[in-house]
């Protein structure tokens, strides 16, 4: 995903739902300051160990509720990341969280969101109970649903990319995403980029 991040090396960025901080080691050379936010103290301790083991000189982690954290940092961040956590929150929670993230971003800042695609054939089978749902995935959405929710939260210019499944065997289906009529069933992951309007 790194090629999709517009980073110059001067940005102060927030990683919401940062988990064990794996994103930090990917983007550390490309940002000025990284802040990870998660509600799990165990994850954050693991993130700090990962940072220290790799000798990364930037990166702070906060055990906090995202909405409360954002309220304390209005118009603060040049970019925000929400990778693989949107599927864990219901629509009302999504709107509350991403409105708060919008408020914590500087005008014209970017939000990067990565999540499963509800239109993907395996997600459709899970939704029908044919395959077991992944634990904690309470709201897997398609691209249009994400675009509508992000617009409701104040974000503009929502751009969608479709990424291959992270498992090698399942990623073999990704090329079928170009097929007419049925291609949307083979697009496993969504990568969305959107912006806070300059005058927001």
Image: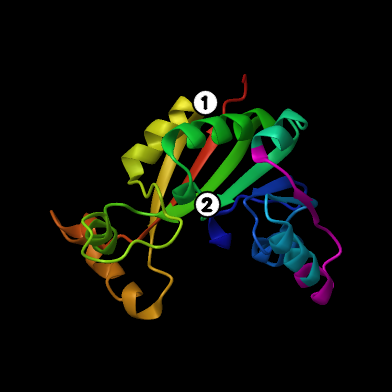
- Asked whether 38 or 197 is in front, the reply is 38
- Residue 113: give x, y in percent of width and height: 51, 48
Left/right of residue 156 with respect to residue 188 in the rendered view:
right
Which residue is denoted by mark 1 in the rendering?
154
- Residue 23: give x, y in percent of width and height: 65, 62
Q: Look at the image and give the residue range highlighted in magenta.
A: 50-66
- Residue 125: give x, y in percent of width and height: 22, 61
Q: Secondary structure at mark 2?
A: loop
At 50% from the left edge and 35% from the top edge, which residue is drawn? 93
Which residue is denoted by mark 2 in the rendering?
85
At 72% from the left edge and 63% from the top edge, which residue is drawn? 42
- In the image, residue 105 sits, relative to residue 16, either above or below, namely above
Distance between mark 2 and mark 1 Cα atoms? 19 Å
Q: Earlier in the sequence, mark 2 or mark 1?
A: 2
At 32% from the left edge and 46% from the top edge, which residue is drawn? 142
Q: Secondary structure at mark 1?
A: loop
């Amino acid at each position: 995903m790194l090629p999709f991040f517009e980073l110059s090396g001067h940005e102060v960025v927030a990683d919401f739902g940062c988990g064990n901080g794996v994103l930090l080691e990917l983007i550390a050379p490309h940002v000025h300051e990284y802040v990870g936010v998660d509600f799990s103290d165990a994850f954050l301790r693991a993130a700090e160990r990962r940072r220290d083991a790799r000798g990364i000189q930037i990166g702070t982690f906060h055990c906090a509720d995202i909405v409360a954290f954002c309220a304390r940092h209005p118009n603060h961040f040049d970019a925000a990341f929400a990778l693989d956590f949107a599927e864990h929150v219901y629509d009302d929670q999504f709107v509350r969280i991403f409105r708060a993230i919008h408020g914590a971003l500087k005008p014209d800042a970017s939000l990067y969101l990565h999540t499963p695609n509800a239109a993907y054939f395996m997600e459709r089978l899970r939704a029908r109970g044919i395959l077991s749902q992944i634990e904690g995935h309470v709201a897997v959405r398609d691209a249009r649903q994400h675009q509508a929710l992000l617009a409701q939260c104040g974000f503009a210019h929502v751009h969608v990319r479709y990424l291959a499944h992270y498992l090698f065997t399942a990623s073999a289906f990704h090329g079928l995403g170009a097929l007419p009529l049925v291609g949307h069933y083979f697009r496993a992951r969504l990568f969305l980029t959107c912006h806070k309007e300059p005058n927001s």
